[in-house]
Image (spheres, rainbow, N blue to C red):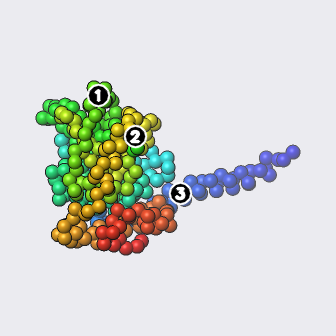
Amino acid sequence: MIQLRTLWPAALALVLSLGLVAWLGPANRAARMANLDVEASGFANTFLMFHTTERGSGYVVDRRDSTMRRSDRGQPGRKWKIFRITGEDGLGDRWLVQSKRRGKGTVFFVPALSVADWTYPYLYEFVRERNPELALPRVEWTQLHVDRVYQGLYLRVGLPFDERKKDGGSGILREILTVQGDRVNVVDTRFDDAPGIYMGAVASGSFPQLRAPSARLAWLARKNPLPETALLMSNLEPHDLSLLPLPISLPELFEAKSGRRPLEVTDERARRWSEGDWRGADDSPLSKVDELDLAADFPDFARSLRAALRTDAVLHQREERVRVEFTRRRSAVAGLGLETGEL
């Protein structure tokens, strides 16, 4: 029979080795974070700060407001609801923040490796800033921190915002339709999928029409890397649709958050929207002045993108993967004479 005294040295060694691994993991991450230069990127820093006592509530602030003490009663502004969507794919957690108050709305923070094209946000913001009449929601890269702990490079994506009735809104939320083939998924601007105006239109036999997009909006939608087409449905009669070329998949995010797909309808007529005349246009809507403007700020964007991706890669120990993906996730600017450089 093996004596216990002959086993304890091996058991002790095993316990010590496991303890060393457990200690080295956080220690190595802390060491990597201590050596990271997050400010090397020109992208803004965003801080999600959880409320000290209210679970699931907190604040979306800049670096200055993130320095508040946990015991401080003077909190920085109105609270948001904060949802953590666990990243089971190993690409990092996604975050959803929501508020019904004016100027806030529904906003996602999506990690870089969950974004299909890393240059498309530059084109999106180019169109959004120069065409305010389109009322496109904000999309931009940011360095995300949660309770002051750096999480990496994230894409901040807002949904269109509808005011509450008591704030002057109609009380009827617009809806976002995501079309792929003959399948239509529906959420509203608060990311819920209860039956609404689209299902009402279908039930009444009225098929919504796609509003002819401007040349720039159609161009932007053609540059979108996703295999699906997102459309915004008006809350006013006749409830027509307009292109909403967001760079993230709302049905995928909904499923990741809720464990199921959002409201879904199969309708062959939906191909009229996603495969309409706007899809086949070849002419560029950009004038010579537009092309000069597009190229003017791109070098700064590209430098910030490279720096932020390098920082993110070191933090998560995936330098080689990020280098490989950098060559793949920049097709949106292909043919536009915009050089991203190399990592």
User: 337 or 136, which lies in front?
Assistant: 337
Q: Work out which residue is located at the far left of the displayed protein and give it.
A: 168
> Which amino acid type is shown beneath numbered disc 3?
Gly
Establish if 339 lies above or below 278: below
> Which amino acid type is shown beneath numbered disc 2?
Asp
Left or right: residue 199 versus residue 315 is left
Identify the element where label 2 is drawn: loop
Identify the element where label 3 is drawn: helix
Q: Which residue is mark 2?
A: 182
Q: Quadrant of the N terminus?
A: top right
Q: Residue 118: where, in percent of width, then height?
A: 37, 61
Count the numbered circles shown: 3
> Gap in Å between the C-alphas at discs 3 and 2?
47 Å
Query: First in sequence: mark 3 or mark 2?
Result: 3
> Gap in Å between the C-alphas at discs 1 and 2?
17 Å
Marks 3, 2: nearer the viewer: 2
Q: Which residue is mark 3?
A: 25
Marks 1, 3: nearer the viewer: 1
User: 236 or 284, which lies in front?
Assistant: 284
Left or right: residue 85 versus residue 16 is left
Q: Which residue is mark 1?
A: 205
Q: Is there any visible trace of residue 56 in the rendered image?
A: no
How would you rate the neighbour count of disc 2 (Cα within 10 Å): few for under 14, some for 14-19, many for 20 or more? Answer: some
